[in-house]
Image (cartoon, rainbow, N blue to C red):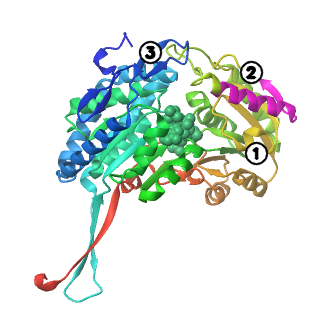
Amino acid sequence: MQKLNDSSLFKQQCLIDGQWLGKPSGHTVYNPYDSSVLGQVPNLDSADIERAIASAQIAFESWRGCLAAERSKMLQRWHQLILENSNDLARIITLEQGKPLKEAQGEVAYAASFVAWYAEQATRINGEIVPSHLPNSKILIEKQPVGVVAAITPWNFPAAMMTRKCAPAIAAGCSVIVKPSPDTPFTALALAELAQRAGFPKGLLQVVCGDAASIGQQLCISEQVTKLSFTGSTHVGKLLMVQSANTVKRLSLELGGNAPFIVFDDADIEQALDGLMIAKFRNSGQTCVAANRIFVQSGIYHRFAAALVARVEALKIGNGLDSLDIAPLIHLEAAIKVKQQVEDALQKGGELLSGSIPSGETNLLTPMVLINANDEWLCSQQETFGPMVPLYRFDTEQEVIERANATESGLAAYAYSQDIGRCLRLANRLEAGMVGLNQGLLSSASAPFGGVKQSGLGREGAEQGVEEYLETKYVLLGGNVL
Ligand code: NAP
């Protein structure tokens, strides 16, 4: 952190009601590469969270009345500052999250793209006037901001998961309280500092740190918080859903995935390998849209496996600050989960074509390719969240669709084939919120990101993303005014 161009972006306090508060002594944050201490953040108590909620309520009351053009300008200024400070933000991401610096730079650009997109969208939140069922009257359909939003974000994309929620919420006229992952709070705090510099009024965007379970519960049961947007595991998402029931809170849940990646005999193999390297190894495998189960049709199974091994063995592993491809996983427990999946696979007939079984003593893993995968393996039902590729063999289109859909998740799916009819059938039948056809990189500010089944509720990005922060109000206008 000492090497930041602007050291004042490194905040070890929380932002509440426009002030940096709290003793940076509650929670220590470590560098996943060498476990060195990066800094500390406060452990806020319930009174602090209450104060944040009250401040957000006041900010909302005035922000909702601002001109759309003012909201847009505020977001434009934030966007500009994010770009101007992108090197520092990328460095903070790599230090606390571990990902390779070039990927962290990509994440900052991606995070900024949501702010830019919603700065424009802020001026396009329109209502409708439709023919009425009664004489001398009109039906007005208005869009209004939902109110105070709580945003709980994970560690794998600490910048993008924050802006993907905050930018549309602020464009819509809401105020937001962000609770970042305790593993990666410094990115969120730096983005909040830039929001302050952009002129955000106090209480519009606040960042709170502390015990996840108690803060989560306090936000869920609060009557003043009208919307919760959560990105994280399906398990925690379900818990928050239950806790939000009493206040009938609006919910957006971006939860876990278990993406099938299907390669047919007629696919362009090089294109499929390009897509797989991105869909599997970005962020060292720690993405919710990561290719988790790789189905390869029998005719090309061994050829594909050999070509994949050549690519995987060329990946460089090490410290994210160096120029490389695979960095350490977020912590040792994540590596132990991968180790368990690999051991399970080997016990059930798998063969390791490349890489080595994780030792369980380091979070820096060699990428692995396993063949002879079957649907009984642990990794068939669990996200791996690491650099391990299990190759499943299949024969027919019908068979692979059924196997791909045999999971409770439905976030992303990928398919490679040069038969356009087959691609369209797959797009139709794969149970996923997002389908990549001959493409491995789905994320974009202008596309609606989200899942079906237990992968969540709602969408982030695009026009659908701002709808999540809007209520529809129906006004029937009659009388002698028309
Ligand atoms: P996680 O364990 O669910 O944690 C996510 C966030 O929730 C963290 O800030 C965490 O804080 C907090 N949290 C945990 N327990 C809580 C509780 N009882 N009440 C309120 N908050 C609570 O997930 P993660 O391991 O950080 O992230 C990885 C998961 O996120 C994967 O499953 C991945 O697929 C999913 N993800 C989904 C998307 C998507 O768009 N669908 C995008 C990215 C990631 P603590 O760390 O203190 O527990």
Confirm or deny contact between disc 2 and disc 3 (CB under 8 A). Answer: no
Of pointers 2 and 3, the one earlier in the residue sequence: 3
The location of residue 102, given as percent across then percent down, is 47, 22
| Residue 453 visible in the picture | yes
| C-alpha span from label 2 to label 3 | 31 Å
Residue at 47% across, 20% down? 29
The residue that disc 2 covers is: 355
Q: Position of residue 477 (x, y in %)?
A: 20, 78
N-term-proximal mark, 3 vs 1 = 3
Counting from the top left corner in percent of width and height, residue 83 is at 31, 28
Q: Nearer the viewer, residue 269 or 109?
A: 109
Residue under label 1: 265
Q: Residues within 10 Å of mark 3 (few under 14, many from 20)?
A: some
The amino acid type of the residue labelled 2 equals Gly
The reply to whether the C-beta atoms of the residues labelled 3 and 1 are less than 8 Å apart is no
* Residue 230 falls within the magenta-colored stretch: no
Describe the element under mark 1 as helix, strand or loop.
loop
Amino acid at circle 1: Asp
Residue drawn where x is 41% and y is 57% of the image: 247
Indicate the position of residue 471 as horizontal and vertical percent values.
33, 61
Q: Earlier in the sequence, mark 1 or mark 2?
A: 1
**On residue 114, which mark appears?**
none
Which quadrant is home to the C terminus? bottom left
Q: Residues within 10 Å of mark 1 (few under 14, many from 20)?
A: some
Q: What's the magenta region? A: 334-358
Task: Say which residue label 3 marks.
Answer: 38
